[in-house]
Every structure is written in structure tokens, then in C-alpha cells.
Amino acid sequence: GSAGYDSSLWNGEYYIQIYDPEQNPEQNYGTGCHSDQLFGQWWAHVLGLGHLLPQDHVAVALDSIIRNNLRNDFVGHKQVPRQFASDDEPGLLICSWPHGERPGVPTLYSDEIWTGIEYEVAALCLYEGRTEPALKVLRSVRQRYNGARRSPWNDVECGDHYARALSSWALIDGACGYQYDATRGALTIAPRLNAEEFRAFFVTADGWGTASITQAAAACTVTLSVAWGRVTLRSVTVPFPGAATVSAHIDGEPLACEIAGSEGTVARFPESVTVSKKSKLVIGFVN
């Protein structure tokens, strides 16, 4: 939970930095709105830990980051010490000072634009169910890397193919609502985009393939097709509450399965089920 965090860092709009200007006179952002301020909460969602900060604060802080730092262009803004976007392009500024009080020597790179932070913020928006802001940030990034001025396969931060852009991996988990606990064999699929006709790549520690969900008024079909390795499961959870019956089979062979859980629909297997390479698990829920 959020117990134990320093509430004095919350100014009602976003989280700030409190520092001693005598001990640390330079490289601070103070009352600035930093796009990376929710890094810990983003990582907690990636790990399936839930909210470490108050959920209402996270929502307001995300709104503040988008409102203050997402720009349609950078005309009149000096990108220092490095420039990663053209003046006529959109992007998410690393830090801004909407209420003034910019330090004389602020945190280094505050005036730059990094795709690694843009992907992080967009993924956190997805985890928080805020799909429109997420897509707005992503459209800005991909407009810059659309192949016209820059390679779509090389996000440049500090150098070519810089590692921070790998934060983009969280986008697929955030958009698909994936959580997989290998110790319990528990897989959750809760799409935040195209939930009624969903199909996407998935990966676990031991296998990967394609997951799909098709929903109708009174039925939901979940399909896991393993392309490599194997996936071991004891339960599969999807956002289809109220199902009365459930059935499951692997490659046409029926499996014992029951409904459990109250949040969303959980298909639970009495024994571990292993879906191997080139096999397909199909689960059908009916209200």
C-alpha cells in the first residue's frame, strides 16, 4: 500500500523534490513537474504489486505530466544539452516548471525529450486505464520515428539504439493487461484496448505465442496458441464477470475446469495444465 511514503512531496498536482539548497545547490528540479516522477509506480505495476502511491494522486499526477510536458512542438524551447526532436515535432518534455521557481542550475537533461520516459508514461497511463493520454503520447513518439527523418527501428537517446527505449516493452503488458505468476501458474488477460475482439503476442518465462479473446453478449472465448516452449497454468482470469459455466480443451481434448473468483472470471484447473509448442488451449465462458 501507500503507507510510509512522504506526503510532503505531494503539492496537490504532482510530486515535487525537497532539497537543501545549501548542501545541494545544483542539479535539482524542486517544484518542477518531472515526467519521471512516477517511475516507481510504473515499475510496481509491471511487477504486479499494485498501487504503492495513492491511486487518486497517481491519476492527478499523470494528468499534470500530460498537461504540462506533452507539447505539439518545441518552437521557442531550447533543448539542452542535446536535441532529440525537431522544433516542429511533438514530444514529452522531461521536466517543466508550471509555477515558475526553475532552479538556476536544474537537473541535467530537464530540457530534453527521451522516448524511454515517453514509453514509461504511456504504459503507466495504460495500467491506470487512461488509454487516450497513452495513445496521445505514443502518437507523438512514433510521428518522430516514422521513417521520414529517423529510423523507426532506432530510438536515439544519448546514442543509437539506446537501452532506455526498452521501456516500450511495458506497453504490451499494459495494453493487454497481462499478469503471469509462474509460481502459481496464474495468467491474467485484461485488455485495455479492443477488449471485445482482442489478439496479441504474449510471453512467459518458458514459452510465447498468441492470446486472443472474443466476446459476445453472453459468451467469451479465450485462446492461447503456443508458438515456442510451453506454458504451465492453474488458472486463467479474464474480464468477463458473471459466467455461469466454463469449458476448456487443448487441441480438442477436454480438460477439467471450474469457475472461481469474484473480480472478472477465473477458469481454474484442478491440476496444472501444460500447453506445449504448436498446441492451443481454448476456454469458453457462458453467462
Image (cartoon, rainbow, N blue to C red):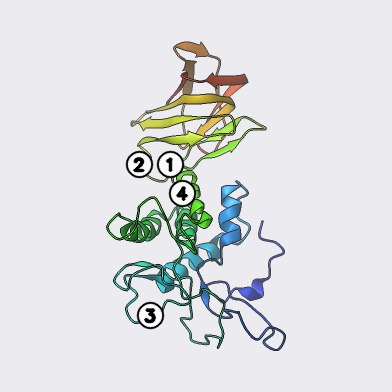
**Mark 3 vs mark 1: which is more N-terminal?**
3
Q: Nearer the viewer, mark 3 or mark 4?
A: 3
In-image side of 219 versus 276 (left or right): left
User: Dot 3 lies on which element?
Assistant: loop
**Mark 1 vs mark 4: which is more N-terminal?**
4
Amino acid type, mark 3: His
Q: Nearer the viewer, mark 1 or mark 4?
A: 4
Amino acid type, mark 4: Leu
> Where is residue 29, by image quadrant?
bottom right
Q: Residue 194 location in percent, x, y?
A: 35, 41
Task: Work out whether residue 137 can be spotted.
Answer: yes
In-image side of 212 versus 6 (left or right): left
User: Dot 1 lies on which element?
Assistant: loop
Amino acid type, mark 1: Pro
- Mark 1–mark 4 Cα distance, whole angstroms, equals 12 Å
- Name the residue beneath numbered marker 3: 77
- Name the residue beneath numbered marker 2: 194
- Mark 3–mark 4 Cα distance, whole angstroms, equals 29 Å
- Name the residue beneath numbered marker 4: 171
Task: Work out whether residue 287 can be spotted.
Answer: no
